[in-house]
Image (cartoon, rainbow, N blue to C red):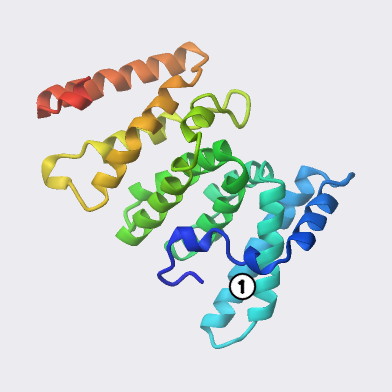
Amino acid sequence: MFKDSPQSTLIDFPLPHVPGSIYGTTCNWIDLPPVEVEDFSAFILRAFDQILLDLEAEQGGGDDSKSQVGMFVALAIVLRCKPETLTSVLPTLREDPKYQGQDKLPLTVWMMAQAAKGDLCLGLYSWAHKLLPLVTEPNSIPQSMDLILQFVEEFLSRPKARTILVDGTVMEGEPLIPLPSFEILVRLTFPAPCARVKSTERVEAIYPLLKDVALSQDMAGSNAVKQMFSFTLRSARKGIVTGDPVLAE
C-alpha cells in the first residue's frame, strides 16, 4: 500500500472495496449519540498504534494483513464521517516521540488525507501545523517532501478550494496557517539560487493561494501583528538584497 504509491491512489484505499450501503449505515451509526469527540479521538490513536504494530510485525515476517485491512477501513470511515476529531489528536501526533520519524509519515499522511476528504480547511490546518514543519528537520529526505507536497496539492486542486480556504476556519482563534509555518513556506518558495531543488517549482505553484489564505487570517492581538510586520520587513529586505522582485513585493 505505501510502497511507491501516489497520494491520489492512497487516499481512497481501501474504501472502494466497501459497499456503499455498509459505508452509509456505518456513518449513520457513528452520528448517533451519546458518543463524544473524545471517544473517537481515543479510537484514532489506538488504531494508529495497532496499525504501526501490525506493520512492524509484517516487517519481522508476521502476517496480520486481515486485521490491518479491517483497522484501515474503520479508521478511514471515522475520519471521513467525523473529520473534526483529527484536531484533538494533532498535538499528540506533533509532540509524542512515538509518532515521529520518517517511517511513520506515510501512515500519518494517509490518515490526514481521510479527514481532508470531507473538510478542506481541516486538511490545510493539519498540513500547516503537522506536516510542513517536518521539512525543516535535519533528517528530512526528498521522499518525505514529495509526500507532503502531494498531500496539499491534492486538495488545493479541488473545485472551489480557494473560496473555501480563504474564508475558512477550523477552531476559533486558530489560523489555518500559523506564522511559523508561513515563514517555512516563504523560505521554500524563495530559496537562494544555489539552493533550488526539484520540489521548488511545486512549492512556487501552490504559494500564491497559500499566501492569500495566510494573509486573509484575522490576527487578533498586537503581538501577532508585530510578528507579521517584522517578518514582512525581513522578507521584503531579503527580496531587495537578492534581486527577487516577487519576494520584495
Image x and y of residue 2, in percent: 48, 69
Q: Nearer the viewer, residue 218 or 10?
A: 10
* Residue 110 appears in the picture as rendered: yes
Q: Quadrant of residue 190?
A: top left
Image x and y of residue 113, in percent: 55, 52
Q: Nearer the viewer, residue 205 or 87?
A: 205
The correct choice, above or below, for 183 with respect to 202 in the image is above
Image x and y of residue 87, in percent: 63, 41
Q: Quadrant of residue 140?
A: bottom left
The correct choice, above or below, for 52 with respect to 135 in the image is below
Residue at point 61% right, 73% down? 53
Residue at point 49% right, 42% down? 158
Residue at point 44% right, 43% down? 157
Count of numbered labels shown in the rendering: 1
Residue at point 47% right, 58% down? 8
Residue extending furthest top?
Answer: 222
Q: Image check: 50 left or right of 60?
A: right
Image x and y of residue 213, in percent: 44, 27
Q: Secondary structure at mark 1?
A: helix
Q: Image check: 217 left or right of 67?
A: left
The correct choice, above or below, for 39 with respect to 175 in the image is below
Q: Mark 1 highlights which residue?
A: 53
Q: Image check: 33 left or right of 239?
A: right
